[in-house]
Amino acid sequence: MDSRVMLDAGLRHHGLSVREPELSGLHERFFTFYADHVAVSSQPYAGVRELLEALRRAGALPCRLHQQVRTPIKGAPASARP
């Protein structure tokens, strides 16, 4: 299920019916908001910090990305793609 279908389903769940082009506009706004807020309030799973520290103490080497990789999200409007 792509994000456009989920957006429409969420609107219908709340008793709202939106047609084109308004649905396309809402979909564009959703992706803009999502891109700007994807990591807000993100936290690692319980125990991850401790695991990483234990691995560091055991001599594990960190993995680092040397370049940013951005892959378009399936269903993203063209304006929200890298």
Image: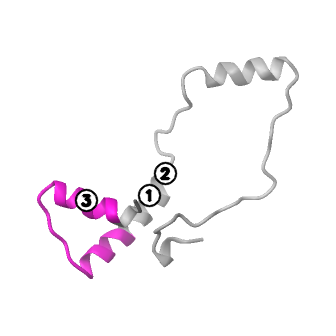
Q: Main secondary structure of the magenta part?
A: helix
Question: Dots 2 and 1: beta carbons under 8 Å?
Answer: yes
Q: Which mark is residue 9?
A: 3
**Measuring 41% from the left and 62% from the top, which residue is drawn there?**
2
Q: Do the residues labelled 3 and 1 touch (CB within 8 Å)?
A: no
Of the numbered discs in the image, which one, if any, rests on residue 60?
none
Residue 12 forms part of the magenta stretch: yes
Q: Distance between the residues labelled 2 and 1?
A: 5 Å
Q: Which amino acid lies under the numbered mark 1 shown in the image of this protein?
A: Tyr
Q: Disc 3 or 1, which lies upstream in sequence?
A: 3
Task: Choose mark 3 or mark 1, whichever is in front.
Answer: 3
Q: What element carries label 1?
A: helix
Q: Disc 2 marks which residue?
A: 38
Image spot of residue 62 (x, y percent): 81, 35
Residue 3 relative to residue 51: left or right: left
- Amino acid type at circle 2 is Val
Task: Residue at the far left: name it.
Answer: 15
| Rendered position, 79 above or below 48 | below
Q: Which mark is residue 34?
A: 1
> Would you say the residues marked 2 and 3 are in contact, meaning their CB atoms lie under 8 Å apart?
no
- In this view, 47 is above or below 7: above
Task: Give how far apart the Cα atoms at labels 2 and 3 are.
Answer: 21 Å
Q: How many marks?
A: 3
Q: What stretch is highlighted in magenta?
A: 5-28
Give the quadrant of the C terminus. bottom right
For residue 27, side relative to residue 80 (left or right): left
Q: Which residue lies furthest to the bottom in this view?
A: 21
Estimate the x, y position of residue 48 in percent, counting from the top left.
63, 25
Q: Quadrant of the N terminus?
A: bottom left
